[in-house]
Amino acid sequence: MFLRKLSANKSGFHTIIFKDGLNFIVGKRENPEEKDLKNTYNGVGKSLAIELIHFCLGSKKIDVFEENLEGWIFTLEFDLNGEEYFVSRNCSDQNNVILNGKKITVGKYTDLLLEKVFGFEKDNKIKYLTFRSLISRFIRRNKSSYTRYDKYQEKETDYAKLLNNAFLLGMDVKLIETKMLLKKSIDELDKNKKIVEKDPILKEYFIGNDDLDFEIIDLKDEVMDLENKVKEFKVAENYRDIQEEADILSFEIRELRNKISLIDNSIRKIDKSISIKPEIELNKILDMYGEAKSLFEDKVKKTLNQVTEFHNKLLSSRKERLEKQRESFQKDKEDLQKEINAKGIELDKRMKFLGGYGALEEYDALYDKLNTLRNKLEKVMDYKNLIETYDERFAQANINIEEQKLEASKYLKEHKDMLDDIMATFRSYSKAFYKNKASGLDIKINDGLNQIRFDINAKITGDSSDGISEVCIFCFDMTLLKLKNHKVNFLFHDSRLFSNMDPRQRLSLLKIVEEETKNEEIQYISSINEDMISTIRDVTTEEEYQHYKKLIDQSTILKLTDKSDEDKLLGMTIDLPYDK
């Protein structure tokens, strides 16, 4: 894949025509004497060119383009597998592109490029391995992508980073994907296990407690006991009728006993009345009034005697009447007791029946309780089996990870030549910068319980400094390009790459890209500031300086300046904060 041309439908836009080999987009300053050189190069459109190429290569929607470039249509021409492609994208209709005259969605467009450029067919795609993620390795897009050699996209996970880099290095990404899936399965098992443990019913049975087995045994005993009761339970269809009859008999017996209590009370009153002797003899009356004997005449005495006799007769008649009444009460009591005895016999019969049988409602209640216990037991058993299954799967997943680790280790041993080639390619570039600094790109097994199968480390001793870090970026990018595990033939760097490089490093980079592009099998494209060549004057001979000055001049495909709006990429000044 070679870039050929970037154009727009607006006449003020500076069309960029890419050549084979070296291509420089140069930012110039209007005032050469300006000391703040860095600021005078900003805003002319060098970095915007990179954003526009990404836009034409199917990036996500860019809101600031829609808001500020209404009606603008950008067109990118490129060669791929010997065929010419023309793709246009409208800032006001970013969901579609026009590819070789045909309108298709951005999604279909990037799927096509994924297949054509990186060899992934529609049914053979791997998650996180997309055209957009892969092409970003050849045209770093953001400020942050110039901070570390393996950082290409914002918010790219470590797994996605490894997957994309490993693919471009020529490694088997299935090994990487397999470990990721195994780790995800373990995480999913752990998540589901925690959900089960939060079940409110299961919490009653000491979830996570070693006594769970004891609780299961207790539940089984309860179920067995209820099953026996249900089995022995006898249902009487007339149970309720018999129960009502028994209740009536019990009530009647209580009423009869209450009547007997009333009779007993009456008899006690009669007995008390009979025991009292109110008779008074005449002589006793006279004795009481002995002092007054002389006062009473015989006639009066005779009258008192008659009264006394009459009173005693009344008392005798009353006693006889009370005794007869007592006999009547006693007979009534005996009759009531007989009735109580008879009803008691009937009640005993019914109670004996009720003791041997039960009502259907009682049976249903008993059976419902049994079913409730059975359901609880089943759920707890399911939980226990589920936990055991989780544990087994955890163990199996860990076994699988260990087995896959051995497989990955075997893979690295069997592909030692490939790893050596990767190492040699990287070192061929890093040594051109630093002959005396240890450097390399090694690939090792990551045996942690995570989604990362391999650790890919590109290192130049001392690359904690900005300049060396940017050299590592260049060497890594060139390695991905040179290994040719894809159909990409270009590498595009922004001028940010050179901002912290010292003149010797810039010179070394120019030497490398000049050599690599001689056969015109690859394009090296870069936006640079005009001081690129002047800064290397002190580290070159005059002859070398003139050579590289001429090389940059001959390879410059566009010059952008801050002289006027017309001299900027869009032909106007506009604030496009696309790289936040």
Image: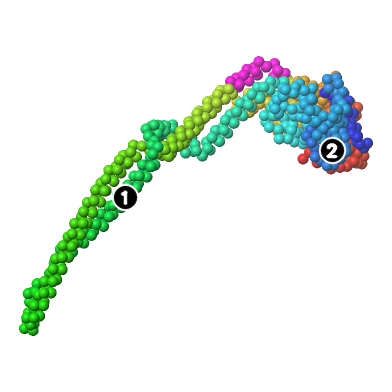
For mark 1, does the 10 Å Cα neighbourhood hold few (<14), some (14 to 19), or many (20 or more) residues? some
Name the side, left or right, on which 505 lies relative to 558: left
The mark lying in front, picked from 1 and 2, is 1
Q: Using the rendered image of the protein, determine whether residue 417 is visible from the camera's viewpoint.
A: yes
Tell me if residue 453 comes above or below residue 249 in the rendering: above
Q: Which residue is mark 1?
A: 252
In the image, is residue 287 above or below residue 42?
A: below
Question: What residue does disc 2 label?
Answer: 92
Colouring scheme applied when the structure was drawn:
rainbow
Which image quadrant is residue 279 in? bottom left
Q: Residue 49 appears at what percent x and percent y?
A: 85, 34
Q: CA distance from mark 1 to mark 2?
A: 98 Å
Of the pair 6 and 350, the residue shown nearer to us:
350
Residue in the picture at 15% in, 67% down = 315
Q: Secondary structure at mark 1?
A: helix
Residue 353 to residue 104: above or below: below
Q: Residue sitting at 74 percent across and 29 percent down? A: 133
Q: Nearer the viewer, residue 441 or 247?
A: 247
Quadrant in which the N terminus is drawn: top right
Q: Which corner quadrant of the image does residue 193 belong to? A: top right
Which amino acid, by three-letter code, is at mark 2? Ser
Position of 31 with respect to 134 (left or right) is: right
**Badge 2: residue crowd in 10 Å (few <14, some 14–19, many ≥20):** some
Give the left or right position of residue 387, taking residue 492 as reference: left
The residue segment tinted magenta is: 403-423
- Across and down, in percent, residue 252 comes to 31, 50
